[in-house]
Amino acid sequence: MLGQIERGESTPTVATLWKIATGLRVPMTTLLEPDREVGDVLLLRDASRLRVRPSEEGMQRALLFPYETRFGFELYELTFAPDFESISEPHDIGVVEHVTVLRGEIELLVEEEWRRVEQGQSLRFPADRRHGYRNRTQSETVVMDLIHYRFIPQNIAGRKTQAGS
């Protein structure tokens, strides 16, 4: 698959990009966005200009804030069409998602149970396990999805230490 992508013979799905990023132990946005300058803290992003429809039908994604090491997260606006359902493979160990429903309602598969989250509600869950999203309503659902990464770098002695704790 990587060879086909490199040769321009195939366009990866969001699921494929997640698998590649997880295998490389990097956030997905490192595959999509250039690195930002360290001094750039002020950043205005317009979701209406950033929305794209990945190859997965029924979902639109706007990457509002790409991953930066100093912050440890990436933030998406996700729009799910009526009757949309998607199951995500586990992210890297320690990854946590924070989902807030801005419009509509969503069901999130967390710890093998579908949990309903309504407009104005938020749910934080471990994303290093299989999880999913589904919109069983007849209206679009819009959510903010903050994905927090906790990478474990090697220190000089070769022992593992937790970063950001």
Image (spheres, helix red, strand yellow):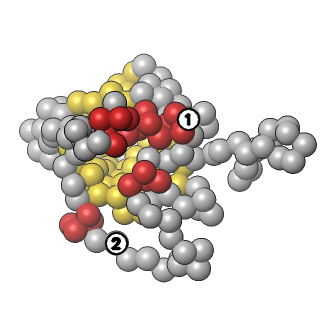
Depicted 129 relative to depicted 125: above or below: above
Please state which amino acid type lies under the numbered disc 2. Arg
Give whichever of 70, 1 is nearer the camera: 1
Please state which amino acid type lies under the numbered disc 1. Asp
Q: Percent position (x, y) of residue 58?
A: 16, 40
Q: Is residue 136 visible?
A: yes
Give whichever of 104, 163 is nearer the camera: 163
Residue 76: which quarter of the image? Answer: bottom left
Q: Percent position (x, y) of residue 141?
A: 21, 47
Q: Residue at x 50, y 57 (%)?
A: 67
Q: Which residue is mark 1?
A: 92
Q: Which quadrant, please, contains the N terminus?
A: top left
Residue 133: which quarter of the image? Answer: top left
Give whichever of 133, 49 is nearer the camera: 49
Q: Percent position (x, y) of residue 90?
A: 48, 29
- Disc 2 to disc 1, how far (Cα)? 27 Å
Q: Secondary structure at mark 2?
A: loop
Q: Is residue 55 left or right of residue 88?
A: left
